[in-house]
Image: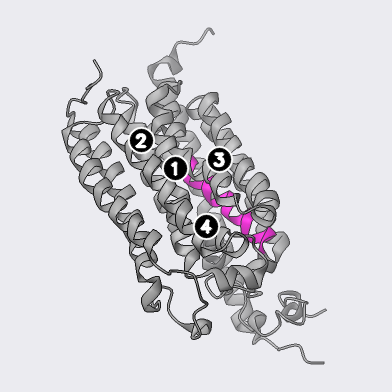
Amino acid sequence: MSKTAAVLTPTAEASAAAARPARWQDYLQLLKPRVMSLVVFTALTGLAAARAPIHPLLGAVAVFCIAVGAGASGALNMWFDADIDAKMRRTRGRPVPAGRVQGADAAALGVVLSMLSVMLMGMALNWLAAGLLAFTIVFYAVVYTMWLKRWTPQNIVIGGLAGALPPAIGWAAATGSAPLNAWLMVLIIFLWTPPHFWALSLYTSEDYAKAGVPMMPVIKGAKATRLQILLYSLVLIPVCLAPAFTGLGGPLYLAVAALGGAVFLVLAWRVYRSKAGDAPDPRAADRDLYDVKATAKDARNLFAFSILYLTALFAALLGEALTGTKALELLS
Amino acid sequence: MNKPILPEDAAAKARRARNIALALGLAAFVILIFVVTLVKLGGNVVNRSL
């Protein structure tokens, strides 16, 4: 075998894409850098909100470990879900379905980085944080990716726990414990995930149906999904206000949570009253993700605002922690 | 035979770039472990029984 042949992907369907050899950037893409940036942000907020003295370098190592752990679970997800990813326009350009990286290489990268991140977290910080990180990786890669995603329309509700845990890992890394306020941050992301993802899936459900993923609009229909979005939003907003009562959030946080929460509820109500997801978009194939037809605009608006709302909530918590703003304790 | 043929130099260039990225990653990891050890041990590194 020539040296050239050795780098070729052997499968026929991937041969066209394999005309370009794998670059290091392809391996970086396996780590889902955009998801990683959100994880870094929420983990950093958890670390800072603990308001515990920690050496800045060790704090940076903790956030680094959480980021690498998140990237590792992303690589494992891309390895296992290559068949689904190849059928959806949002994901078909990923390195494995496009044939630029072998599935086994993606899996190996995921396993190695998982072990490195957990061991480093344990040795540099503490084993509670390492244990939570290991749990998060296993929960995302095994429980969500290999089981829930293909099995139940509650996939993103339960699987959302993996994306919600980074603030608790950050808090545990800083203090060696995970008190109720840390879990309150987890609960906020956990309850935020369903309305966020279902709003998106209302106008991308054709893709999920084509790939055989049992997303809520595919299985239960658009109307039931819109009701679920409203119900989750009604639970989410009071929980978002709770940190102002438990000594976690300050006045800035309370203002952001209340004003943003009101807007969130209005948008969720509009989605409930809309026809979003009722009929497939005839233009489907190659349109842009945000280029939706008129009836789906309410769903798109909620999806976009949900990202802004969560970012603003955690930015407020982070800002208050870094500036030493006293947290409110409205209950006491 | 319908396998696409890569230009030898393009494949070698990509492999070289991957190897350099891997080497830099490993070097950064070694430095990271060294610095973390210094931070964790601090001044206690000299307080060992001889």
Q: Is residue A290 visible?
A: no
- Marks 4 and 2 share the same chain: yes
Check the picture and name the quadrant holding the N terminus of chain A: bottom right
Q: Secondary structure at mark 3?
A: helix
The circle on residue A239 is: 2
- Over which residues does the magenta segment extend? A64-81
Q: Amino acid at mark 2?
A: Val
- Marks 4 and 1 share the same chain: yes
Query: Which one is earlier in the sequence, the residue at label 2 or at label 1?
Result: 1
Question: Label 2 crowding class (10 Å Cα cut-off): few <14, some 14-19, many 20+?
Answer: some
- Marks 3 and 2 share the same chain: yes
Q: In front of the other: label 3 or label 2?
A: 2
* Callout 2–callout 1 Cβ contact below 8 Å: yes
- The spot of residue A26 in percent (x, y) is 55, 67
Whole-number angstrom distance, CA of label 4 to CA of label 3: 40 Å
Q: In front of the other: label 4 or label 3?
A: 4
Disc 3 sits on a residue from what chain?
A
Whole-number angstrom distance, CA of label 4 to CA of label 2: 23 Å
Disc 4 sits on a residue from what chain?
A
Q: Is A201 displayed left or right of A245 in the figure?
A: right
The circle on residue A23 is: none
Q: Which residue is mark 1?
A: A191
The way the protein has been coloured in the rendering is one colour
Whole-number angstrom distance, CA of label 3 to CA of label 2: 31 Å
